[in-house]
Image (tube, rainbow, N blue to C red):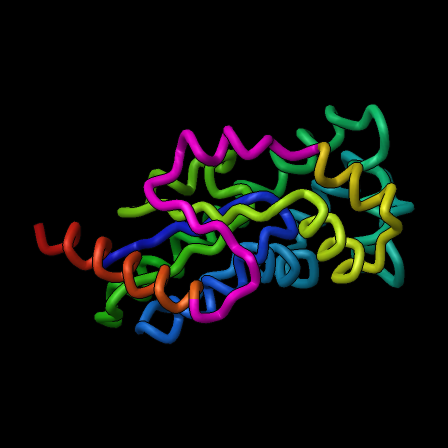
């Protein structure tokens, strides 16, 4: 079974390419969606987060994502972001491994592991092919602000907390420069699928 990892800086538009790949028979495992689900369902993860960041991140007994984000993405909060990732990565990684094993047992063609922190969480080690999506900073900034309801300054802080484009370029097997063109995304998905299937059959 093929496992394709897809990553890139926030706001690069990974979902456009992920959707094109999903149409080619890959089970889409979205690490962000997994994380958000775990915030609602994983008592051990939430207990660790409260212990690390305080019970003021709770609202009606659940983790308030906006309050938590404000704590870890503020200026000078690199250590807090690192602490957040240290706690959450292990839970997200376990769920990704479970999904991959389930897909393999079900005879799926492959899994698309869609994870912004694919490399940092070492999930790339599970992948046959790593794809990175790139987009200009001004485009990513606008997407993040619109998607998450952030001010430009808040969105910029999130961008600055992430590795630069060179980090991804060095570690990926295939690069997609996303200008928002669906035809380009479809063409890239065809090429990625061809490469992945070829490697799996080698």
Camera-side residue of 36 and 195: 195
Q: Is residue 21 above or below residue 49?
A: below
Segment colored magenta = 161-183
* Quarter location, residue 163: top right
Quadrant location, the N terminus? bottom left
Depth order, front residue of 20/57: 20
Left or right of 11 in this view: 178: left
Is 62 located above or below residue 170 in the figure? below
Q: Residue at x 38, y 66 (%)?
A: 21
Magenta residue check for 174: yes
Q: Position of residue 63 (x, y in %)?
A: 79, 54
On the image, the x and y values in percent for residue 49 come to 73, 42
Nearest to the observer: residue 82 or residue 188: 188
Q: Is residue 181 magenta?
A: yes
Quadrant assignment, res 64: bottom right
In the rendered view, tell whether residue 152 sits above or below residue 159.
Answer: below
Is 22 positioned to the left or the right of 74 in the image? left
Query: Hey, which quadrant is residue 61 in on the image?
Result: bottom right
Q: Residue at x 46, y 63 (%)?
A: 18
């Amino acid at each position: 079974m093929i496992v394709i990892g897809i990553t890139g800086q926030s706001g690069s538009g990974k979902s456009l390419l992920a959707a094109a790949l999903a149409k080619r028979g890959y089970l889409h495992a979205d690490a962000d969606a997994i994380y958000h689900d775990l915030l609602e369902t994983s008592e051990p993860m939430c207990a660790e987060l409260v212990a690390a960041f305080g019970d003021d991140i709770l609202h009606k007994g659940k983790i308030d994502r906006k309050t938590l984000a404000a704590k870890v993405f503020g200026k000078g909060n690199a250590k807090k972001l690192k602490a957040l990732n240290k706690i959450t990565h292990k839970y997200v990684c376990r769920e990704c491994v479970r999904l991959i094993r389930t897909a393999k047992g079900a005879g799926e063609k492959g899994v698309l592991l869609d994870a912004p922190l694919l490399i940092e969480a070492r999930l790339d080690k599970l992948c046959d092919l790593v794809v990175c999506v790139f987009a200009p900073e001004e485009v990513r900034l606008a997407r993040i602000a619109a998607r998450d309801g952030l001010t430009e300054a808040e969105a910029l802080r999130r961008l600055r907390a992430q590795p630069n484009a060179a980090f991804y370029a060095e570690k990926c097997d295939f690069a997609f420069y996303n200008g928002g063109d669906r035809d380009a995304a479809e063409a890239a998905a065809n090429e990625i699928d061809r490469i992945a299937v070829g490697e799996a059959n080698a």
